[in-house]
Image (tube, rainbow, N blue to C red):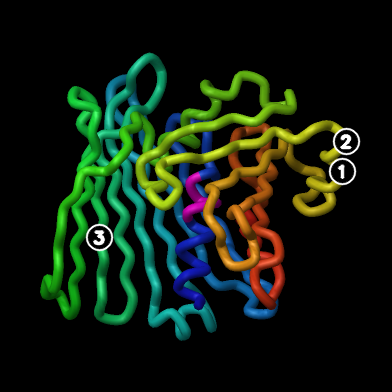
Amino acid sequence: MTNRILTAFFSLFFIQSFMYAETIKAQYSVSYGLFGEIGIAKAFLRKDQNTYVIDIKLESTGLAKTLSKGRKERHISTGHIENGLMVSESYKVIRSYASKTVTKEYLIDHKNKKVVKNYKKEENNKQVSSRSEVLEYYAKNDLLTLYFNLDTLVKDKTNPQTYQFSAVGAEKQNGNVTLIIPKKNQLGDYKKTLGNNSAWYATAIIHQKIFSSEEGKLLLGVGADGITNKAVLKDVVFFGDIVAVKK
């Protein structure tokens, strides 16, 4: 179960952690109810006028490391800059535990508006399976670039509104990702959960059941620098919330 928790929470949170800086490095601690800390995440973004690279690493720790057989993840997005926005050309997800490694690489063909997904599984450094497929949807963003681009896409982050986006990597929901800016009378609940030290608050939804969270709702507290201070996935199975805090 710990494997799935780390994967699910990564998809919801670490893609949402950074939105503004040209070059950034940051680290987060992830905890889960009675288990305590279950992982750490390190993120790096480098962007110039023409290209960008986003590289995020997640590693299990403590009891979770033992239960997940040393679970690690790495998410890498590369591409170009277009009208001030990052446009993905390749999005790679590498997950490993014990002697097994699974790699998913999405290659985005903007000219023909299609996405090819390449899947490869290895055990003991030997390939045991592979396949390729064309996805049923196309998007300029992957899960990482979408959230880095929100600074431009969401003009007023204090105005209550619901936004619908599409991103490569969100396959189970056909690319659909929702971002909700809460109403003023809801901010008290957000601050109670996330603290008062954030400039604005939001909920990200990936429209996928994750344990007892029916749609995969994640509460976010974002600082004035555009970096998420704290994120909480509420009421996950029996042990409480999954919480990520910036170190």
User: Residue beneath label 3, please?
Assistant: 103
Kind of residue indicated by mark 1: Gly
Is 99 situated above or below 51?
A: below
Kind of residue indicated by mark 3: Thr
- The percent position of residue 126, horizontal first and vertical second, equals 11, 75
Cα–Cα span, label 3 and label 2: 43 Å
Left or right, 147 with reference to 236:
left
Report the span colored magenta: 11-15
**Decide: marks 2, 1 in contact (CB < 8 A)?**
yes
User: Residue beneath label 1, please?
Assistant: 188
Is 167 situated above or below 214?
A: above
Left or right, 36 with reference to 189:
left
User: Residue beneath label 2, please?
Assistant: 185
- The percent position of residue 109, horizontal first and vertical second, equals 20, 31
**Decide: marks 3, 2 in contact (CB < 8 A)?**
no
Give the main secondary structure, helix, strand or loop, of the magenta stretch.
helix
Cα–Cα span, label 2 and label 1: 7 Å
Check residue 200 in the rendering and tell me which mark sits there, or answer none.
none
First along the sequence among labels 3 and 1? 3
Residue at 60%, 34% in the rendered image: 226
First along the sequence among labels 3 and 2? 3
